[in-house]
Every structure is written in structure tokens, then in C-alpha cells.
Image (tube, rainbow, N blue to C red):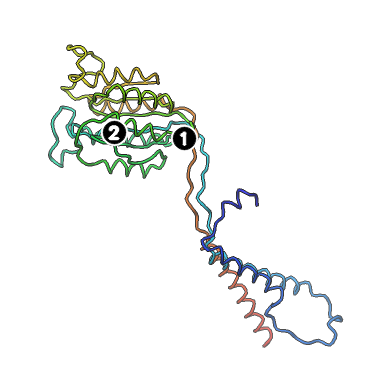
Amino acid sequence: MNADAFNAIGFDSPMVLWILSLLLVPFFLHGQRLFDYPAIILLPVDCTSRWIERTLKLLGIIMILGLVMGMAGLHLKQSEIERIGHGAHIMMVLDRSASMNDDFAGRYISKPADQSLSKSAVARDVIAQFIESRKQDLVGLITFSTSPVFVVPLTHDQEALKSALASADVKGMGFTAVARGLGMALDYFKGKPVTGARLILLVSDGGAHIDSQTQDQIRTWFAREHAALAWIYIRGVNSPSIFIKPEDGDDSASAPEYFLHEYFKTLNVPYQAYEAENPTALKAAMEDVGRMHNLPSHYFEKQPRRDLAGWGYAIALMALGLLITAKRMEINTWHA
């Protein structure tokens, strides 16, 4: 057994291992009935009996070993396995502001039966389909409104991601604090080795004013973490386009989405923007993001701890059963 395999083994109660000294017992106490012979040297060598004796001793050792391993809580420690495939490390930043409760026509969804028509519900459904089709990706989720909420870290666990999306099935509130959401997403990459393409995927129906100091910070963070940015702008019927400059010039208050888009273009990182005016366009944008970020990557998949105590008890029970069977056969033969 090499050092790595040995280090992977753990015990809940290592002090119980001193009982392993009982492994010597089968060599001195065989538990078999003895018969006196005046001159045993005259008896022929019985190879079968010798092998039976050795087998019974081995069964005794196995029984004690299995029992002690079970009592000590034998287990394999949590480990990591390196996986190599195609995909990306995607931190999704999902808008949960009050405007996401509207449908694509700008109408507020108030009836519970119509909640599936809201921009928020449609976005979650499309994201769920995207995740389902990208099993090689590591995906994390952050939601934001006035403040960001860290929902789930980067993972390939489909069930965890589905649960994370389901947890966002509440009405949004507050404003669109884009900068805080992006900052939290970028902070997750901080200090971690770059093992694949990194992408911040912003899904939002609005923009926000970002002061110059915060702009410089975000620009620095993107450069430091080597992360690309994609923005899927969910555009309502009466919402301005992010690709058309407003008529009133540089008034960022009247069209914050346009100026946010212009700022993103100055980040000096790969950046792609999409306008989604309906569920079909939103799905097409997600598919395009997937095609653009399907690069070779590798990651470490955590393997949970595996309890082996039950196997120890099972092996001890089987060995004990064979010993009891052998003992019963010895008694029946002697009486015969």
C-alpha cells in the first residue's frame, strides 16, 4: 500500500486498534479437542488436517481484524479526483430586483397562477435548461437586488444547482445593485488556480450607475481573475436598447443600461452582450454563450467520505459463521 492510499484511510476511534494484539490468539489457542497418542511420530503426515488447521487460524484472524476495524470506525476520508473535459467555470449573477417580477411586456405579475410568465421565472427555466445541457461545466449562482446573495459555489452537481435555482423562486425586491453582484462573483475566483475558462454571466433586466472608484475596482478584479463577461439584457417592450445611444447624450440616469454596457466594453476582457426581448431570444442567447465558452478545462471533484465499518462487521460475521460451522462438524465427528 503506497503512502497516498494509507493517508486516505481514517478511524473514528483509533484507540480501539490496540485490540489488534488479539490477532496472535489463534496461533496459541486453536480451540480444537486434543487426543492423547503415545507416539504421534508414528502417525502418517496428514496434509489435509494441516491445511484445515491453517484455514481455521486464518478465519480467526479475519474475524478479529474485521471486528476491530468495525469498532474503530474504519472509513475512507474525503478526497478529490481530477476531472478533465470541455466546458467552463461559470458564475451566474441573476437579477432579483422588483422589475424582474414583470413579464416581457412590462406588466406586473400579481396572480400566483401567472408567476411562470415573469422574467424571473423564464430566466430560471432557461438557466436550468442551460445547466442540464452543460454537464461538464462548473456553475455557481449569485442573486442580487439591493444586496447580493451567495447561493451556491462552483459545482457540477446538477441537483444542487436545481435546488439553488428553486430557492430563488420568490418575488424580487429592491434595486439593481449590479456592482455588488459582480464583485461577489469575482471574489469567488480570488486565490484559486486558473484551471479552465472563467466566465461571469450576468442576467439582468436593468442597469445601474457605478461610481468611478467602483468602476476601477471592478476593472482591476476582472483583469486579476482572468474572467470573461457576458451580459444577457432582458429587455422589456418599453425598455431602452443597450446598443443605441440615448438622445439626451450623456445623461446616465435616463438610460443606465446603455452606459453600463459602454462601461463593460472598457474592462479589457472578453465581453459579449445580448438583448433578449422574449423567452426564445433569451434561450438563444444562453445557447450562444455555451458555444463560445466550450473550452478544455480540468477541475477537482470532491468525493465524500465512505464508511467501511459495516464491511468490517460483515466480514467478521462471515468468518465467525464459518468457524461455528467447523466447530459443529468437529463435535458431530467426535460423537460419531
Mark whose residue sits in front, 1 or 2? 1
Residue matched to label 1: 192
Residue 169 x/y as whole percent: 24, 41
Can you say which quadrant of the picture contains the C terminus? bottom right
Task: Say whether residue 287 is left or right of residue 116.
Answer: right
Task: Say whether residue 202 is left or right of residue 108.
Answer: right
Image quadrant of residue 62? Answer: bottom right
Q: Nearer the viewer, residue 175 or 101?
A: 175
Circles 1 and 2: CB distance less than 8 Å? Answer: no
Q: Residue at x 67, y 68 (%)?
A: 58
Residue type pointed to by label 1: Lys
Helix, strand, or loop for circle 2? strand
Task: Say whether residue 299 is left or right of residue 116.
Answer: right
Depicted 226 relative to depicted 323: above or below? above
Looking at the image, the residue that sits furthest to the right is 42
Q: Nearer the viewer, residue 178 or 106?
A: 178
Task: Say whether residue 308 is left or right of residue 252.
Answer: right
Residue type pointed to by label 2: Leu
User: How busy is the neighbourhood of tag 2: few (under 14 within 10 Å), some, or many (20 plus)?
Assistant: many
Q: Residue at x 15, y 22 (%)?
A: 238
Depicted 36 relative to depicted 258: above or below? below
Q: Which mark is residue 93?
A: none
Residue 17 x/y as whole percent: 59, 65
Residue 60 x/y as whole percent: 64, 71
Residue matched to label 2: 94
Q: Nearer the viewer, residue 255 or 281?
A: 255
Looking at the image, the residue that sits furthest to the front is 213
Residue 89 x/y as whole percent: 42, 32
Image quadrant of residue 123? Answer: top left
Q: CA distance from mark 1 to mark 2?
A: 23 Å
